[in-house]
Image (cartoon, helix red, strand yellow):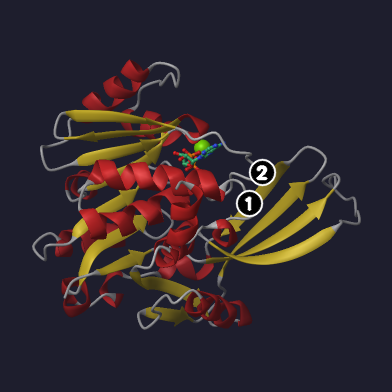
Amino acid sequence: MQNRISVFGSINMDLVIYSDSSPSEGETIFGNNFETFLGGKGANQAVAAARMGSEVSFVGKVGSDLFGKILKEKLELEDIETELLQAHTGESGVAFINVIESTAQNQITVISGANSHAQSDQLSDEALSSSEIILSQLEVPLQEIEKLFSRASNKGCLRILNVAPALQLSETLFNETDIFLVNELELSALSNKPLNLDDISSIKECIDSLQLNDDQSIVVTLGSKGVYVHQHNKNEFFSGHKVNAVDTTGSGDCFIGVMASNMLLSKNLFEAADFANKAASLSVTKKGASVSMPSRQEVLDFWS
Ligand SMILES: Nc1ncnc2c1ncn2[C@@H]1O[C@H](COP(=O)(O)OP(=O)(O)O)[C@@H](O)[C@H]1O
Ligand SMILES: [Mg+2]
């Protein structure tokens, strides 16, 4: 039975330093704290979907270093299948994150490492056929996503693309995507139009300019404002939920993983986005990215 989500994406070791200030050039300072987390858009979205109870397979590359082993273990602790995860001879992807605690600002440097060697043929035709959803983001080579989505087109998989970071898509990748997932900045970049968050009609104008075909949909997350969904000439806006926001890192990834998981259950994009909006708002009440992803029960309990 096809009930699996295959995530073809990035996985990083997040190395997070918490300090009162950032060192200037040539300066050495003492920080307050250091923590490591499973990160990368692909891995975060896989965790969000797995915590919803979905069967999730992660397809990508870690390095042959110690981080690679730890990252694989972290995925497995989340009940994510790692049979198609491969080790590339070299370094794992890492993100150096400096959180300045006094201002809550952060500085991030990402090294793609093994992620830039992820290959679409890690997913065999058989593995593709047993996936109901293929989910990807733009932190692995775009031409590999394009090949994978093209191969998936006659396999009955739903192809969901998180257009993040905001990069230009080839015509083929654009046409081979069933559901686009973007935040407001990514929608503006994708449509090459300015967007005013306070004016819903400007969101609609950006979407209209993309000239999606009848089988394509788009979901636009708008931070604390909520989410806008467009499918087959039907548009719906779901307001954001008022919560005590502590850390919004990974809220987009939470939204996407939860939405994909709910698409397996109801096949209704509007219902899935409504539920994901609730889950993502819950995720911002906790610190961290993948560690703040709620379980399905936590979402149901919170909103009951
Ligand atoms: N401050 C907030 N309060 C409530 N919900 C939030 C908040 N920030 C984000 N969210 C939820 O997370 C989703 C994704 O956030 P968004 O900022 O649009 O994504 P990204 O992290 O990709 O920029 C939103 O659609 C909303 O459901
Ligand atoms: Mg945002």
Picture quarter containing residue 14? bottom right
Up-down: is 180 above or below 71? above
Closer-to-camera residue (302/260):
302
Q: Is residue 193 left or right of residue 61?
A: left
- Return the residue at label 1: 286
Residue displayed at 41% across by 21% down? 195
Q: Is mark 1 within 8 Å of ligand 1?
A: no
Residue found at x 73% / y 65%: 35
Name the amino acid, label 2.
Answer: Val
Which amino acid is tagged 1? Lys
The residue under label 2 is 246
Out of 189 and 208, give the one closest to the viewer: 208
Badge 1 density bin: few <14, some 14–19, many ≥20, Cα 10 Å? some
Quadrant location, the N terminus: bottom left
Pick whichever of labels 1 and 2 is earlier in the sequence: 2
For label 1, the SS is loop
Residue 214 visible, this angle: yes
Give residue 192's position: percent from left, percent from top: 35, 26
- Image coords of residue 208 (percent x, y): 22, 25
